[in-house]
Image (cartoon, rainbow, N blue to C red):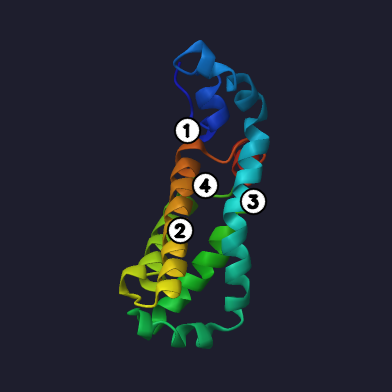
Amino acid sequence: MQQDWDDVSLNSVNRDARSSHSVLSLADGLAVSTSDAVLLIGRIMLGWIYLSSGFPKLFAIAHVAATYPPRGLAPWLVWIAVPAEFFGGLFVVLGFATRYVAVVMVVFTIVASFSSHAYWDVTDAALRRAQDTNFWKNMSMIGGFLIYFVAGPGRWSVDRWLARR
């Protein structure tokens, strides 16, 4: 049975999937029955940090641009990064343009991680640990976006609403 790409989500992909062993499959029913709610909660949690961090930057573009050269970034990139951060976070929460937004957020997070959280360049132990934590937190968020890219937004999303119109 061929499936339309707009209909692919964690719910539809894994509806009949079972873990490899019966002992490991106890949570399968719960995962299938709650997938849309869990995807919504996950989208809110993943997108909120970008949405809340990007919002004040929308009103301080010049200030944010001034922080770019010391991090090795051209100031004009602020006009791409700040809207990507805010609107990307908003679109993740809403489940809009899922796969495109996931790719944009992966790129944004990679650039932000390597330019802002380069812990390997920090000599102070406490600051190094803080940057290390932030760098690897961002790497785990990239993992979330990769899952989001494959799983889709779930039924409770703008993408699903648009697909049904």
Q: Of callouts 1 and 3, which one flags the residue occurring earlier in the amino acid sequence?
A: 1
Q: Quadrant of the C terminus?
A: top right
Task: Say which of marks 1 and 4 sits in front.
Answer: 4
Q: Is residue 90 visible?
A: no
Query: Disc 1 to disc 2, how far (Cα)?
Result: 28 Å
Query: Disc 1 to disc 3, how far (Cα)?
Result: 23 Å
Mark 3 surroundings: few (<14), some (14-19) or many (≥20) residues within 10 A? some
> Which of these two is toward me, 162 or 124?
124
- Identity, as a three-letter code, of the amino acid under mark 2: Asn
Relative height, residue 73 to residue 29 (above, below): below
Q: Of callouts 1 and 4, which one flags the residue occurring earlier in the amino acid sequence?
A: 1
- Identity, as a three-letter code, of the amino acid under mark 1: Trp
Which residue is labeled 2 in the image?
138
* Residue 26 figure quarter: top right
Task: Say which of marks 1 and 3 sits in front.
Answer: 3
> Which of these two is toward me, 20 or 6?
20
Q: Which mark is residue 44?
A: 3
Q: Quadrant of the N terminus?
A: top left
Task: Say which of marks 4 and 3 sits in front.
Answer: 3
Identify the residue at the far front of this view.
125
Q: Which mark is residue 98?
A: 4
Query: Disc 4 to disc 3, how far (Cα)?
Result: 13 Å
Residue 116 x, y percent position in the rendering: 41, 72
Q: Of callouts 1 and 2, which one flags the residue occurring earlier in the amino acid sequence?
A: 1
Query: Disc 2 to disc 3, how far (Cα)?
Result: 16 Å
Q: Which mark is residue 5?
A: 1
